[in-house]
Image (cartoon, helix red, strand yellow):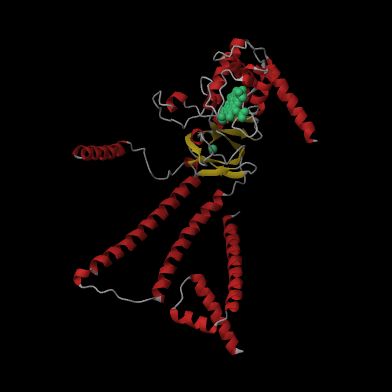
Amino acid sequence: MGTIRITTCSFMLSLLLVGNAQAAWTLNLTPGVTEISRSVYNLHMTIFWICVAIGVVVFSIMFWSIFHHRKSRGAKAHNFHEHTLVEVIWTLIPLGILVAMAVPATATLIKMYDPSDAELDVQITGYQWKWRYQYLDQEIDFFSNLSTPREQISNEAQKQAHYLLEVDRHLVLPTDTKIRLLLTANDVIHSWWVPALAVKKDAIPGFINEAWTRIEEPGIYRGQCAELCGVDHGFMPVVVEAVPPAEFEQWLADARAQQDAAAAAAGRSWTLEELMTEGEQVYQRVCAACHQPNGTGMPPAFPALVNSPVVLGDVERHIDIVLNGVQGSAMQAFREQLSAAELAAVITYERNAWGNNTGEAVAPSRIVQLLQGDGQSEQEGGQ
Amino acid sequence: MKETLKRCWQTVLGVLAGFFGVQSEARRERDFREGRALHFIAIGILLATIFVLFVILLVRWALSLGGA
Ligand SMILES: [Cu+2]
């Protein structure tokens, strides 16, 4: 008993000390880096202090009454059924407080819901479990995947500072620019949430929700998916990188060059070794979450790829599954998520890793053909 | 005629007290003694409609102030 009490006590003490040491650790809302986030923060604080004041007044009266009219002093309960005047007063006061709070809250809401005159449009699409960012009119389109290594998640490596809040590609945005965000989802409902921007908006399949932001300070702002969306809901963070407009122009140019390079890469011929090296990277980044780093999967939910009849069998069927997914299962269509070279590389990797020795290489040019061919037949189907 | 108007007015007051949530026992008893259920329902629907219209106007007005 005694030891338990002592350990509990020192545990509480250490909690207090840790609380002091980590000044950055905070329970309160962040004031953020936009005009909207600041007014949300101010509203929150105003309402918080109103609640504190009400609490103090109500509980003071209550405790004073209990103490002052205690039985030992011979207090007698006063029996009455109703008192219209008192009831009217205690209805009118809260009504007045609510209206007083509604006025500034409405002013903020109206501002929040006005995405007009935006200078940049970004479409954000939620996928299980990653975000896709498309800069409309800028020809930039990419996926942003969690980049925390699997070893940290499974406690085989030390967890780093931005554990589960880091991605391979940031959503880069210019500062001092009104940016309209168009939110939707590909599979189930997600919610795009970045506290520092005071943006939290549902991303719903088949709907487009609007939000906007105007970031005032360059920096990196992290957020998460805020709508329970499946097993890896906690593994699809948001990372916004705000940079000055000139730097943003430079980033746009670089990102376009990178996309062009990826397209060009698909056109040249690749050796089996090159495909295997690239394929392993793609596999670990995109596929390992379900099929596991060593290809053993997690049957029955996620099939093993080692000795899989699909992977060892007809290459056309293998390509079809990876490009188009399996309807109604967690296996998504990767045709839009990966470049042709990445698709070819990851399929080649699966056919030659972990003892799957087919010796077959899938050429990126073949995937390019398939993607283009399908595109045409889709168009014809639509006519 | 004067009597009907007075009744009508009392019903309106009774419904408004219901909206507000506070009513004295004496008035409640009078309403139950003199009032007609159908009148209360009709006036209740009417006042609820007016309240909804009022809220719509209020929102329009707030939006026009906000410049949206
Ligand atoms: Cu999600």
* Picture quadrant of residue A214: top right
- Relative height, residue A80 to residue A91 (above, below): below
Q: Assign ligand 1 to one image quadrant.
A: top right
Q: Examine the rendered structure and indicate whether residue A210 appears above or below residue A377.
A: below
Image location of residue A187, percent across then percent down? 61, 37
- Horizontal relation, residue A27 to residue A269: left or right: left
- Where residue A310 sits: x, y (%)? 63, 21
Q: Nearer the viewer, residue A87 or A22?
A: A87
**A268, A321: nearer the viewer:** A321
Image location of residue A211, percent across then percent down:
57, 44
Total tally of numbered discs in the picture: 0
Q: Which residue: 52% across, 43% down? A: A199
Decide if residue A21 is in sight here: yes
Apparent side of residue A334 relative to residue A32 in the rendered image (left or right): right
Residue A145: percent from the left, percent from the top? 54, 29
Tell me the quarter of the image containing the C terminus of chain A: top right
Q: Against A315, is B32 above or below?
A: below
Quadrant where the N terminus of chain A is found in the figure:
top left
Residue at 52% x, 56% y is A106
Whether residue A239 is visible to the viewer of this picture, yes or no, is: no
Q: Nearer the viewer, residue A219 or A73?
A: A73
